[in-house]
Image: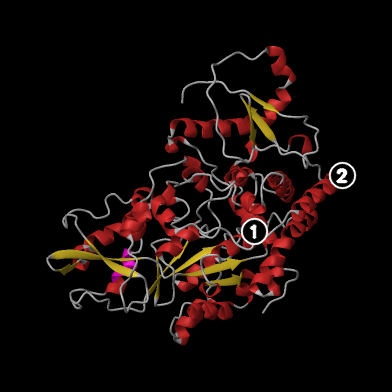
């Protein structure tokens, strides 16, 4: 990026009522909303006056961090170089770039407590749940991702429970079929697994009419969310079922991140992972479905009841990459969502969602991803800042636009939006039927694992188990529990819990109504 100067200034008085006016920045002479996709124009460098600088030094300290982010985004827009755009490593790495400015909070101040309560009241007054969204046409999806649709067929092998097909293999059978797989490049564990797959690759090729074919599979089911809601524990228990196979590791994040070239959020964009790299992750399971071809030479799978699962807790909610890759023709809403593509390829897929009291989920999320100086007081501050940013977005955009707004999501110090379960679920239900989505509560799973696991087995149409295997699945210790150091920090502050409870209540009410189950109100600690 060539060296250039940009001129930023706040439009309006800093003491204006923030509820009446969204935070605006000015780049050159063009007003620009904090929550919009940004475009920055080049300007001939010129020197700022010393007097003006000192008069506005407090103002520039407020927008400095945001300016750095905007300049990086501008570099991306001007040069088209996606690899150079740095993404937010996690919501908790963004704290230095977000300042509450004149609305700083003091926990001992009754006025500030009343202020944030008004923010929440303003948010809840704007909560709306549209009956439906506009579903994109199939040809628009194909136009957006032509390669993906050219690789995955519309029909799968008959007589096989899992979606699989045979793909002609045109490569050199003596070469390494996984040499270009990008998952192997960034993971030592993948390299070990792929080494085993290389050694057995040729024996699994199926000859037919003078050509060689390899079996390919997609998952039969997906564990799609939510983070810090028990998905790891569910995954670990399902892995013990003899008819269930998974990818070589829990969360490939292909649909939400890797296919856009996001590897680690702190590193910006890399090469986009092609769909072939994603399919490679299922080869181990596909070979088990296929069976040993030295015995079964017909090419028909010998274990047709095995199913494959994929468990990325970002799949349900994370559409943050859309703003960098799709045209913004929908007034701030993504033209395509993850589920649109999944449905176009797998209309019969099944999905498992594990949810948790969104108030407790947010605190657990903070404790897990927070790096240093974690405390109940710090959590309260971050919640307050995030609520203000979200409320500011709602002054300009619809609720759904703000939930999917990449800029505001990256700017919020805690991931408030992840707990707005009903917004995501309603969008999934626009393309998939209610019968294809199993929604569970972590609270129920924690107190009666046998009950929830049987619900999962029934949902996936899995056969009966021996008592020994069922005991292993239901009685093993819980996975991915809170770290001892985080437990020592204690619970969140009562006022933080009250504020968050007020914020999430209208969303929980709608969720309970859609699911016809009042336990999703999380109004008490009722168990099964």
Residue picked out by circle 2? 111
Give residue 210's position: percent from left, percent from top.
12, 65
Task: Give the mark nearer the N terminus: 1 vs 2.
Answer: 2
Give residue 500's position: percent from left, percent from top.
74, 56
Quadrant in the picture for the C terminus: bottom right
Give residue 206's position: percent from left, percent from top.
19, 68
State the extent of the magenta-drawn residues as a range: 283-287
Q: Quadrant of residue 10?
A: top right
The secondary element bearing badge 2 is classed as: helix
Say if the magenta span includes residue 361: no
Taking the image as shown, residue 397 lies to the left or right of residue 39, namely right
* Relative height, residue 40 to residue 92 (above, below): above
Q: Quadrant of residue 288?
A: bottom left
Residue picked out by circle 1? 419
Residue shown at 58% from the left, 14% from the top: 46
Q: Quadrant of residue 205?
A: bottom left
The disc label shown at residue 52, or none: none
Q: Is residue 136 visible?
A: yes
Taking the image as shown, residue 286 lies to the left or right of residue 461, namely left
Give residue 48's position: percent from left, percent from top.
64, 15
Residue shown at 61% from the left, 78% from the top: 448
Is label 1 in contact with label 2 (beta carbons under 8 Å)? no
Q: Nearer the viewer, residue 131 or 41?
A: 131
Residue shown at 64% from the left, 72% from the top: 515
Q: Is residue 371 visible?
A: no
Taking the image as shown, residue 195 lies to the left or right of residue 425, namely left
Residue shown at 43% from the left, 63% from the top: 344
Question: Mark 2 Cα within 10 Å, few/some/many (few <14, many 20+)?
Answer: few
* Relative height, residue 516 to residue 215 (above, below): below
The secondary element bearing badge 1 is classed as: helix
């Amino acid at each position: 990026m060539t060296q250039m100067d940009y001129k930023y200034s706040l439009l309006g008085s800093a003491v204006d009522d923030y509820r009446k006016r969204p935070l605006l920045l000015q780049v050159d002479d063009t007003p620009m909303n904090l929550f919009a996709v940004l475009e920055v124009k080049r300007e001939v460098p010129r020197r700022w006056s010393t007097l003006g600088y000192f008069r506005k030094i407090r103002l520039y300290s407020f927008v400095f961090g945001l300016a750095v982010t905007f300049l990086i985004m501008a570099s991306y827009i001007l040069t088209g170089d996606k690899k150079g755009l740095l993404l937010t490593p996690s919501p908790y790495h963004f704290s230095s770039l977000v300042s509450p400015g004149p609305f700083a909070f003091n926990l001992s101040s009754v006025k500030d407590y009343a202020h944030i309560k008004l923010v929440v009241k303003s948010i809840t007054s704007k909560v709306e749940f549209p009956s439906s969204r506009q579903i994109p046409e199939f040809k628009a999806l194909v136009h957006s991702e032509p390669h993906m649709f050219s690789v995955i067929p519309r029909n799968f092998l008959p007589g096989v429970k899992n979606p699989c097909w045979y793909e002609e293999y045109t490569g050199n059978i003596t070469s390494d079929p996984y040499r270009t797989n990008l998952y192997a490049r960034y993971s030592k564990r993948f390299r070990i697994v792929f080494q085993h797959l290389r050694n057995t690759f040729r024996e699994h090729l199926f000859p037919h009419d003078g050509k060689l074919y390899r079996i390919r599979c997609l998952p039969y089911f997906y564990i799609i969310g939510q983070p810090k809601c028990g998905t790891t524990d569910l995954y670990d228990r399902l892995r013990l079922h003899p008819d269930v196979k998974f990818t070589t590791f829990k969360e490939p994040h292909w649909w939400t991140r890797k296919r856009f070239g996001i590897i680690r959020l702190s590193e910006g964009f890399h090469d986009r992972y092609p769909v072939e790299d994603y399919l490679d992750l299922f080869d181990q399971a596909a070979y088990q479905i296929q069976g040993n071809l030295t015995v079964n030479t017909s090419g028909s799978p010998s274990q047709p009841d095995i199913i494959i699962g994929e468990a990325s807790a970002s799949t349900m909610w994370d559409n943050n990459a859309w703003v960098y890759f799709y045209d913004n023709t929908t007034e701030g809403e993504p033209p395509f969502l993850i589920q649109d593509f999944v449905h176009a390829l797998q209309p019969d897929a099944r999905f498992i969602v594990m949810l948790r009291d969104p108030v407790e989920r947010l605190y657990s999320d903070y404790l897990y991803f927070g790096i240093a100086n974690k405390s109940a007081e710090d959590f309260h501050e971050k919640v307050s800042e995030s609520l203000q940013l979200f409320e500011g977005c709602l002054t300009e955009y619809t609720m759904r636009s703000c939930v999917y707004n990449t800029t505001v999501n990256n700017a919020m110090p805690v991931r408030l939006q992840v707990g707005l379960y009903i917004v995501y679920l309603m969008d999934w239900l626009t393309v998939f039927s209610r019968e294809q989505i199993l929604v569970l509560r972590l609270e129920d799973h924690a107190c009666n694992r046998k009950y929830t696991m049987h619900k999962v087995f029934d949902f996936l149409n899995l056969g009966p188990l021996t008592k020994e295997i069922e005991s292993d699945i239901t009685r093993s210790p819980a996975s991915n529990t809170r770290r001892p150091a985080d437990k020592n920090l204690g619970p969140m502050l009562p006022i933080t819990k009250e504020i968050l409870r007020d914020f999430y209540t209208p969303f929980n009410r709608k969720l309970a109504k859609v699911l016809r189950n009042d336990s999703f109100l999380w109004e008490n600690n009722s168990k099964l």
